[in-house]
Amino acid sequence: MKHTKWYLSCLVSLCITFLQAQDCPYFPADCPDNGSLEASHDSSQRIQNGLLPQEIQMQDRVRQLVTSQIYQAARTLHWRAEELDEYTNLDPFQSGGTPYKLRSPRGIGIWMQCIVSNDSLKAWRSWLQDYAQQAVQSGQQASQQYADVTGSPQYKACWDSVNHYIEAAAHYAESHKSEGASLFSDREYLRLTEKQKSFTDKLAALTSQPSAESQHAGQEQEKKRMTQAFFASSVVQVFVTVNSGVGIVHSSDNQSERIGALSIPGTFRAFSVEHQDPQTNTLPFHYNRWSHEIVLFLGHWLPQKDPFQNYSSAFTRAGQADEHTPKQVLSDQVQTISIHLAGSPSNMLRLLKLLDLQALNALIRP
């Protein structure tokens, strides 16, 4: 019943997709997580999560500068910007009782989105609705075909034969149980079990629908291709992460990517990244969701790449990221900034030209 599983999976996915569209003007682009944003902006919540007031003040300064730059750039480009989510508890050591002089750098991650074309967004929404209808129709046709097969005389005859040989083999085994293990090499017992397997295979062949499954796989590939195309024409997303221990260029050790170095003043390193097989359904802050990225690193990073071709923050050395070594740079000071942009190359460059990297570098402790 493999076809039934993928049909139900398709229906569930579509239902979830369109439930998410309720009250969200950005659908099918990503939508703000208002609950998460409210908690991340709430100073009292962050205090409960183990942050100190001065660490919270640092996060708020970062947010104010980053969001104001994106909103201003969007206004200049006649785009529409929105903060989608925020992470203010990034460091793994969040013990509120750790003394200030021993605390590792506290981080913040900000995820923003710019709608660059309302027309493309509407076209994306319309296409997705058409895709949903086609997928449901294909699933209904596959289910009807399955019902036709399982209701046919040929299917019933095979099923009766399977049951007959199951019972015959069980009866033979009961009658010859005194033979012990040698029963399983008995010629007649093997004949009965082989007959059972033969008719079971015929049942599987009757209900197999390779054309329907192939069509479903083709629809999924088309959905992925069109989602990438509509995203590129509709959206630019920006991920800004402060005081992360790792700056990600290569998203995973088995991900096929084309990575090129960029020369951008005010950066430690900068790259263009093209994902050969973007994973559309992965979570945000997994940077291989979309086809094209621009990656910028600002601040204090180690010059050598790690084994995964990524960069480590300078504070990962000499105990500066732990909770018991005195810190040369305190937890409420910015040491690294990474910026990931996702979208079409031309739109990413338009936005990048309007970012004030000098102001962002001014946040970083010399």
Image (cartoon, grey):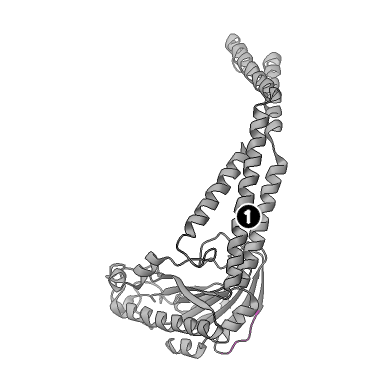
Residue 117 drawn at (x, y percent):
59, 74
Look at the image and say whether residue 53 sits in the magenta stretch.
Answer: no
Q: Quadrant of residue 97?
A: bottom left
Q: Which residue position holds label 1?
A: 131
Left or right, 212 with respect to 33, comes to right
Q: Residue furthest top?
A: 175
Tell me if residue 14 comes above or below residue 199 in the rendering: below
Name the residue located 33 percent from the left edge and 81 percent from the top edge. Answer: 57
For the N terminus, give its image quadrant.
top right
Residue 80 drawn at (x, y percent):
51, 77
| Residue 181 makes an appearance in the image | yes
Q: Which residues are magenta?
A: 261-265
- State whether the magenta stretch is mostly helix, strand or loop: loop
Tell me if residue 1 comes above or below residue 35 in the rendering: above
Name the residue located 67 percent from the left edge and 53 percent from the top edge. Answer: 219
Residue 273 drawn at (x, y percent):
63, 73
Residue 302 drawn at (x, y percent):
53, 80
Q: Residues within 10 Å of mark 1 (few under 14, many from 20)?
A: some
**264 vs 85, nearest the viewer:** 85
Q: What is the secondary structure assignment of the residue under circle 1?
A: helix
